[in-house]
Image (cartoon, rainbow, N blue to C red):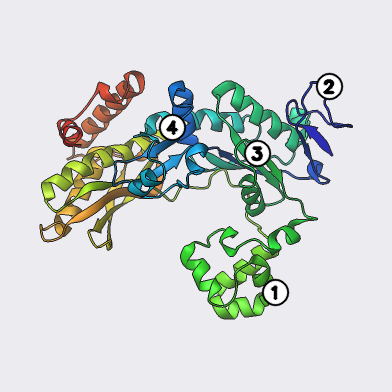
Amino acid sequence: MKLCRACARELAGVRCVCGGEQMLAHAELAALAIAHLDCDAFYASIEKRDDPSLEPYPVIVGGGRRGVVSTCCYLARTYGVRSAMPMFKALKLCPHAKVIRGDMRKYVEEGRLIRAMMEALTPQVEPLSIDEAFMDLSGTEALHGASPAQSLIKLQNAIWEARRLTVSIGLSFNKFLAKTASDLDKPRGFSVIGRGEALAFLETRPVATLPGVGPAGATALERNGLRRIGDIRAAGPQRMRALYGDWGAHLFALSMADDPRRVDPHGERKSISAETTFFEDVRELEALEDILWPLCEKVAARCRASDTAGLTLTLKLKDARFKTVTRRRQLPEPTLLAARIFAHARELLAAEADGRVKYRLIGVGLSDFSDAAGADKGDMLDAETPKRAAAEAAIAKARSKFGRGAVQTGRALKTEREE
């Protein structure tokens, strides 16, 4: 089966009547319905779209010189810049890059608009983050008068027309292979992995391709000579279980292209967090509190954008020797208020920051989510929480309409001046 990438028509030849010359061809194209959509260099692409003067330049979105790269455009990647890279290293590789601090409120809203376009195709959309999601288009042919592949081509083009942003799509028969396929041909790619080729495709791929295998996991596998997915398959299920228990058995199943996970539109995000790395190491509690407050505001804004509230708070610190400390606290009730996040995080921070240790990073996050409608109710003796909730809702509304600078706290202004 061959489809035109410009109009999604089925092709008989090499050129479509619409004039489009790019095609999508695969023997199983009509039989596959599990997709992964990933926005290309999302934050950087939005910044380039909104400021055309940035177009010729490598663009990095991230923190200050001692921060890390959140994302970067594809031009910056040709210089070796990558997400999560320390900013000083990124600027050494690409000193002429344009560095943008970023605007999460804008990115979240853009992600919402794209998500709505996905949900117009199928209710089976499982978000992974604000810029990527799984989709199951099984049974949508009658609704849209098109195969899942045709609907996805139309979606990809519609996102470009409406938002001037590119997305890459992977199509397969399970989530693992759909996500793997979406990484094969960026930007604006559309890749397909069918049942007939899945085992041969996976044979030579590195073990880090498998979901849940990070650098430490890959190292553990390589110690036993398991460098490629084909090595795991050759080891067999018994040896993999003997070496790594249930995890080993799970990896063997993936090596056989077996992933039974369903696309779950109600799949919950595990955590919402924000962190920053300092330009200079900090030991003073008051200075750390000043940095902590805007991070609490960011977490609160992200919770509000996703209509969720968290019950468990986590504080993260990294000292000058790169030792990481995390402290957790279960809150009295779910919250999405910056003031309550800050109050509890501040107590955890005060127990650690006694002035003897210098820190280079601080972060805060929420997890154990529930619906925002049931959050921050307080009790009969707590009149302050409902007032604070109303105030923060009003601030969020003003910032949404007039920009983040429309309402600022004294602590936030102090931090900005120091930065």
Seen as rendered, the residue at the extreme right is 12
> Which label lies toward us, 1 or 3?
3
Give whichever of discs 2 and 1 has the lower sequence position.
Answer: 2
- Disc nearer the start of the sequence (2/3): 2
Label 1, label 3: how many angstroms apart (C-alpha)?
32 Å
The one of 347 and 387 positioned closer to us in this rendering: 347
Q: Which residue has dot 3 on it?
A: 189
| Residue 151 position in % (x across, y down) | 71, 32
Q: Residue at x 12, y 50 (%)?
A: 285
Q: Type of residue at label 4?
A: Tyr
Q: Which residue is mark 1?
A: 234
Q: CA distance from mark 2 to mark 4?
A: 37 Å
Mark 1 or 4: in front is: 1
Between the C-alphas of marks 2 and 3, the distance is: 22 Å
In whole angstroms, how far apart are the C-alphas of marks 1 and 4? 44 Å
- The correct choice, above or below, for 219 with respect to 338 in the image is below
Q: Which residue is drawn at the image coordinates 83% and 21% (left, top)?
A: 17
Q: Residue 374 occupies which quadrant of the picture?
A: top left
- Residue depth check, mark 4 versus mark 3: number of the one nearer the observer: 3
Q: Which residue is mark 2?
A: 17
Give how far apart the Cα atoms at labels 2 and 1 are.
48 Å
Q: Secondary structure at mark 1?
A: helix
User: Would residue 229 appear left or right of 126 to someone viewing this image?
Assistant: right
Q: Secondary structure at mark 3?
A: loop
Q: Is residue 207 above or below residue 294?
A: below
Q: Is residue 95 left or right of residue 19?
A: left
Q: Residue at x 37, y 33 (%)?
A: 102
Tag 4 residue: 107
Residue 417 place in picture, x, y as percent: 17, 32
Q: Amino acid at mark 1?
A: Ala
Q: Position of residue 69 (x, y in %)?
A: 39, 44
Q: Is residue 273 visible?
A: no
